[in-house]
Amino acid sequence: MKEIALLTGVSAQTIRRFFKEPAHLSERMHRRLKAVLGEMGLATIARAPQVAGDDRETAQPPAPASATGACVAEVSPACGPHEMAASTDDAPSSLPPEPATPPPAAGLDCAESPPSQARQTPRPGAPLTIAEIADLAGVSTKTVSRYLNQSPLLSDTMRGRIEEVIARTGFVPNAQARALALRRNFLVALIQDGRAGEIAQAVEAGMLEAMKESELALVLHRLDTAPAERDANLRTFLLRHHPCGVVLLPPLSEEEAIARCCAQAGTTAIRLGKVPGNAGLAADDRAAMASLVHWLVASGHTRIALVGGPESSLSARERELGYLDAMADHGLDRGPALIEPGDNSLASGLAAGRVLLELSPRPSAIIACNDAMAAGLLQAASEAAVPVPDTLSVIGFDDTPLATMTCPPLTSVHVPWRALGAEAIRQIRESFTPPSVAVSDPAPAFEARLVERGSVQALTRALVSDAGLEGKSARRTSGFDHASSPFAPAIETFAALPKFPE
């Protein structure tokens, strides 16, 4: 009762009168409540008031003691096991005493709807209810409710009839009413701490794409409070809005306390990025970084430096481990002097670049663990008058829109954040789809790939041509005789190394 009152924006006493004393409500209020209950799939037999004069019906005399009592809401079984039924017993006991209920109309049994109300005529210009859709399709309200809930009990014939009516009338279910009836919201929250930057934009785009033609809606929530306050902040948000699912971006997705908070609130949580126990959706950052180093070595670079990410970030650690793996495979220097820490910001990339460019001998290539730090490296190279890519090659990671805005544009490792966002929505929808309807597909493999732009110069022309690169340096190798090249053994070695997927 209270939930219906909240949805319609009226008091619980007004809802109670709708069921027990419809004559005490204006015709306008009666229509308003009836429309909402119709969207919920609740069939009510409360009598509409007769309008006279001031749009209100004159009060009826009290019913005799022998009267059967007021008509109450009849709950249609159409709503299925997940939908709620309205009951006048939900009214708070603190309500003031109400006048006796007027007797039912002569010849009308309270247990059945009057024939004039059994089939509703669509009102011109007013939103259709599922009762009106049922009338137009010639089926019961229960059947329409089963269709909306994707019930497997519905035959193809019935489903086709309802689909035809919905397509013809442009009917759109009331999400608020369905959320109340199903006791489940249709909101999905994307939660981050403000440091995800352009990654968040890519994930959001993928989520919105996957939400098309569905009842789901996206809510953005920024959880940037102090760590000690995060749990309380998140718990308040979840209990206040009751989203049907949340998508957590790194670094929040890496925190077990955040995941536990979502589980305790009964909310499905999809974690993106590297997560303990491989419980998140992520590309293989370690293998991607190793492939990048192999590609640089095959391009003639042997002194390669790295700007790492935050020490607390599992993804940053995976990328650093991939760098160390590949450098060890080639027997190249991977000492601490070639690895500078960063915090994923442009400023940290600038500071790390200033240090690395002072090394002697200077690195011929520097990899940053994200694009923002790589942009900082470009700025450091500009300050030191080190031309990129002629003297220094710079490579980023994630392939965010920033990579196309620098000068020169950044070569970067593309991480499919957009696809990860779309997959998160698929899993959330699957979490509340009845098991008899859901088709559980395994999560696809998300592979990183190299996107070449103008920030890398190959030092070995033969190897660049053999690798099939299409950048500026590759065009310079046109007509080069690979077979007679002194680097032929190295070319054969490169062919056996792991490569980025096409």
Image (cartoon, rainbow, N blue to C red):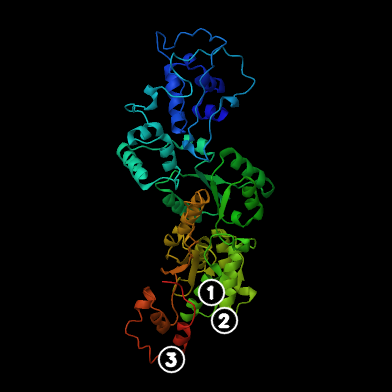
Upstream in the sequence, badge 3 or badge 2?
2
Q: Which labelled disc corresponds to residue 290?
A: 1
User: Measured along the vertical axis of the image, is residue 138 above or below residue 54?
Assistant: below
The image shows residue 478 at horizontal and vertical percentages of 33, 81
Which residue is painted at 46% across and 57% down in the image?
418
The image shows residue 84 at horizontal and vertical percentages of 53, 35
- Give the quadrant of the N terminus: top right
Observer-nearest of 64 and 280: 64
How far is disc 3 from disc 1 in space, using C-alphas? 26 Å
Type of the residue with mark 1: Ala
User: Measured along the vertical axis of the image, is residue 342 above or below residue 49?
Assistant: below
Type of the residue with mark 2: Asp
Tag 1 secondary structure? helix
Marks 2 and 1 close (CB-CB < 8 Å): yes
Of circles 3 and 2, the one toward us is 2
The image shows residue 253 at horizontal and vertical percentages of 59, 55
Mark 2 crowd level (few <14, some 14–19, many ≥20, 10 Å Cα): few
How far is disc 3 from disc 2 in space, using C-alphas? 22 Å
Observer-nearest of 125 and 202: 125
Q: Which residue position is annotated with label 2?
A: 329
- Give the quadrant of the C terminus: bottom left
The image shows residue 141 at horizontal and vertical percentages of 42, 34
| Residue most extreme to the right | 228
Observer-nearest of 367 and 114: 114
Q: Which residue position is annotated with label 3?
A: 486
Tag 2 secondary structure? helix
Marks 3 and 1 close (CB-CB < 8 Å): no
Residue 385 visible in the picture: no
Upstream in the sequence, badge 3 or badge 1?
1
Which residue is painted at 40% across and 48% down in the image?
212
Which residue is painted at 45% across and 87% down in the image?
492
